Image: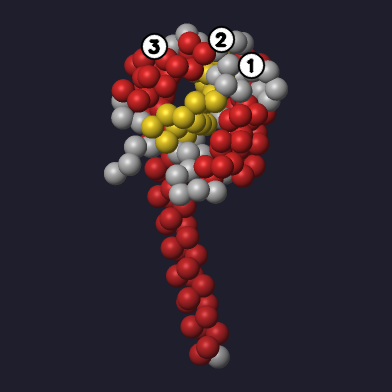
């Protein structure tokens, strides 16, 4: 099974590289971007490829497109992609802004390796539950549609 692809976005080089190192060491396949503009370009390219991203981790405060704006743009096209926002800003308004935009988790900088990996694991677990539920919903709708067609054919 291929490693899960994670897009990591942070304008602080040392933190971005640290996240990349931690994720790679844990068996993930991180790809980095220095800001929201570069990240959204990489996200769009990967989305139309055979190797889309399975998680996005972004800083909140960046030049150009902020982390909250990036999250909002991604949610518009892929509402079930796990999204984690990290930030040195940890006031209630910043957390609220990211959650309203669609982020799944908020992680305060600096964070510990174990904290980061626990949040990433939890995001993938939530995504798996959502995918399973979406699959059940699709199967149920298909069965209902077949039953409707069969009952209409009997009339």
Please give the name of the residue rendered at 43% of the width and 19% of the height, measured from the top-left corner. 19
The quarter of the image holding the N terminus is top left
List x then y, in percent, for residue 56.
51, 31
Q: Quadrant of residue 79?
A: top right
Residue 100 appears in the figure: no
Neighbor class of circle 2 (other Cα within 10 Å; few <14, some 14-19, many 20+) is some
* Separation of marks 1 and 3 at Cα, in angstroms: 20 Å
- Which residue in the protein does label 3 denote? 112
Q: Does the residue at mark 1 contact the one at mark 2 (Cβ under 8 Å)?
A: yes
Q: Does the residue at mark 1 contact the one at mark 3 (Cβ under 8 Å)?
A: no
Label 3 residue SS? loop
Q: Is residue 153 left or right of residue 67?
A: left
Please give the name of the residue rendered at 45% of the width and 63% of the height, measured from the top-left corner. 140
List x then y, in percent, for residue 46.
52, 42
Q: Is residue 116 left or right of residue 74?
A: left
Hey, which residue is sitting farthest bottom in the picture?
A: 155
Residue 120 appears in the figure: yes
Mark seen at residue 61: 1
List x then y, in percent, for residue 111.
44, 11
Which callout, 1 or 3, points at the residue further toward the start of the chain? 1
Which callout, 1 or 2, points at the residue further toward the start of the chain? 1
Colouring method of the image:
secondary structure
Which callout, 3 or 2, points at the residue further toward the start of the chain? 2
List x then y, in percent, for residue 152.
55, 85
Q: Is residue 67 above or below residue 151?
A: above
* Separation of marks 1 and 2 at Cα, in angstroms: 9 Å
Question: Total marks drawn?
Answer: 3
- Which residue in the protein does label 2 denote? 88
Label 2 residue SS? loop
Please give the name of the residue rendered at 48% of the width and 13% of the height, measured from the top-left corner. 15
Q: Quadrant of residue 62?
A: top right
Mark seen at residue 73: none
């Amino acid at each position: 099974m291929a490693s899960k692809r994670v897009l990591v976005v942070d304008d602080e080089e040392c933190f971005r590289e640290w996240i990349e190192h931690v994720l790679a060491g844990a068996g993930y396949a991180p790809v980095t971007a220095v800001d929201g503009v570069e990240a959204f370009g990489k996200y769009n390219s990967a989305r139309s490829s055979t190797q889309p991203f399975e998680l996005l981790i972004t800083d909140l405060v960046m030049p150009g497109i902020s982390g909250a704006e990036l999250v909002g743009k991604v949610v518009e096209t892929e509402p079930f992609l796990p999204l984690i926002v990290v930030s040195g800003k940890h006031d209630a308004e910043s957390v609220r802004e990211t959650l309203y935009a669609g982020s799944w988790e908020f992680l305060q900088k600096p964070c510990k390796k174990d904290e980061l990996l626990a949040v990433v694991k939890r995001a993938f677990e939530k995504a798996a539950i959502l995918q399973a539920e979406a699959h059940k919903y699709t199967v149920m709708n298909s069965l209902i549609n077949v039953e409707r067609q069969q009952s209409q054919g009997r009339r």
